[in-house]
Amino acid sequence: MAEAVADAMGSGRHLVVQAGTGTGKSLAYLVPSLLHDQRVVVATATLALQHQLVERDLPRLVEAVKDAPGKLDTSYAVLKGRSNYACLHRIREGVPDDQGALDVELPTGSLGKKILELRAWAEEEAEGGGTGERDNAPRHTDREWRQVSVNHRECLGAAKCPFGQECFAELAKEKAHRSHLVITNHSLLAIDAIEGVPMIPEYDVVVIDEAHELTTRVTQAATDELWAAEVERAARRSQRHVEGDQANDLADAADALRDAINEARPGRFERVPEQLSDALVLVRDAARACVSAFPKAEPGEAGDADAGRTQAKGAVQELFATADRMAAQSDADVLWLTEGSERMPPRLCVAPLQVWGPMRDKLLTDKTVVFTSATLMLGGDFSSVATSVGLKPSERLVDGDPVTEPSVSDHALPWRGLDVGSPFDYGRQAILYVARHLPPPGRDGLVKAQLDEIVELVDAAEGRALGLFSSRRAAEAAAEVVRERLPHLTTLAQGDAQLPELAAQFVGDPHTCLFGTLSLWQGLDVPGDTCQLVLIDRIPFPRPDDPLLSARQKAADQAGGNGFMQVAATHAALLLAQGAGRLIRSHADRGVVAILDPRLATARYGGFLKASLPPMWTTTDPAVARQALTRLAASAGD
């Protein structure tokens, strides 16, 4: 893999490389990255991998090469979006109130107490030369963090801010400009490369780790939201800075938007209702007029004097950009309305119908890209993932030659696909059990036969089970039944405590089950006897009413493709592979992946899904699965 990465960097050809858990793929791209003669960016999807690279892999690598002959630039830096850093101006001068004035007074109660704690932490970071990154802060909620941070529109800028010299975000940018290797995340990469907002210093090559997550993260970065209360608040914050009626007009537009949202049905809009369309135009025009009405800064005006105005204007500019995008009703976007809840009002959301086009035009055409992950071959092939990120299967190089000759008009982007395999012997270490005898899953959640099967498997394993469920309701129902029928085991359900706490309990006691949903499918690493059974209740197809994926499926059908296979089956294959990958994390691990959905064995698409999983020994006999688990539990007890 290291040789292939070095070749890609030297030749400018893209590389898609699948490297299983335990292969050491981080070092396989970090070594060529340090040897490359220009700056390299490494983009990850999760904080866990970012921490692994910065806290473990890179320090070890730098130490290992310190005596190498020649001058090797081993400098590296971490770079995140501005809102990931504490803002010293907001902490020291206050948070804009609804009128846009800076209010240094703290809210009362637990919120105020937590803000005090975060402020004290940030000051310690500033005094001690810390990074001020959110990940290092005391535990907090999103709402609490917003009281000590700003987004890029609210930022005064280093030149105007009285604390610009100390600014954590500016210091991180400066360090990145001085570094050979920059570690960032998928979202920041998308904003820099695809949306064209300069966030990362000039670079030659980007390595995208956890590349199976890339299209989701790029989509998230390009998704905007709008709701009436947000428009109202922006109007109130503008009132003290705008002399005319423009702020009041924006407040009136907020009322029109609220009425239109209340009349609309949640879900995707194939045709936007006339009342909602008119309301979006009202918000767009009122926001544009309001932005224009803000007075310009006086020459020599101090940064703290216009901080409230800058941040109020930034909020209205953001509203305008979002409302303008929604009002355009572009075929390239998908617009939908969420269901409201007690904690969150209904919100309008807009997201790109596809991201492969912008990725191809704005990233792949300009940079050399190495995509890597443990899960990139779906259905036994790279085509699905390659297509989703903007590479064409016809451009793949096999033995140095393209699969087909590109047309003269086509700007070809040659790429190689490489599967470096796995250090694990899945055929000996793992059993894939497909419960073919069970009824297909329905809409009403888990049925008695599935619950009985879960209890029997967990009982045979004496705990040691990770349950991956399609919904919180299913996870809680399974947990309740297992607690009732196997009271001697400890059964945890997602939501009982914070995820790190649940994971620690799961690791600490082998006779424990942990049942949860999506965040457990991808984010849990528990090698050893802790986890010898991975339960998956059903094939994780997207919900039929998922606004974005259903729109993408329909678009694929209209383009003459198979929308179900290109979108729904690919989505399911990726999650299944990630979920099954929780089982074998080291050479010593043994266990059973039990999929309680007979369609994996009976449906036509089952072969595609199974080909996306590690090559485990397979059975449909429940007795074989239970006997294997019983033997493993007994040997673990020894």
Image (cartoon, rainbow, N blue to C red):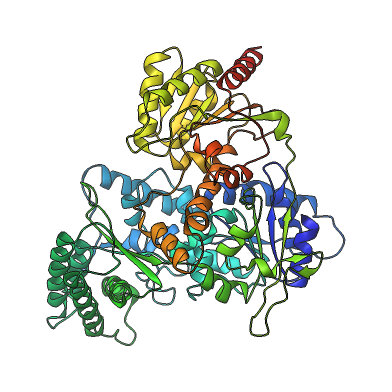
Q: Nearer the viewer, residue 87 or 146?
A: 146
x%, y% of residue 574? 55, 48
The extreme bottom residue here reads: 299
Query: Compared to 493, does 260 lie above or below?
Result: below
From the viewer's side, name the closer residue of 499 and 443.
443
Report whether 373 appears left or right of 285: right
Q: Residue at x 40, y 69 (%)?
A: 152
**Residue under the image location 16 percent in, 66 percent down:** 260
User: Do we see residue 36 in this rendering?
Assistant: no
Which one is nearer the viewer's eye here, 529 or 304? 529
Image quadrant where one finds the C terminus: top right
What percent of the width, then of the height, locates residue 598?
Answer: 50, 34
Please state the total of marks drawn on the protein image: 0
258 sits to left or right of 291: left
The image quadrant that residue 495 belongs to is: top left
Give percent across and percent down for residue 517.
43, 38
- Please state if 245 lies on the left or on the right of 441 as rendered: left
Residue 537: horizontal and vertical position, in percent?
46, 33
Evaluate whether residue 501 shows in this view.
Answer: yes
Q: Quadrant of the N terminus?
A: bottom right
Q: Dividing the picture into quarters, in which one does residue 475 lie?
A: top left
Q: Residue furthest right?
A: 69
Residue nearest the viewer, comparing 518 with 503 = 518
- Dividing the picture into quadrants, the one containing residue 611 is top right
In this picture, residue 348 sits left or right of residue 149: left
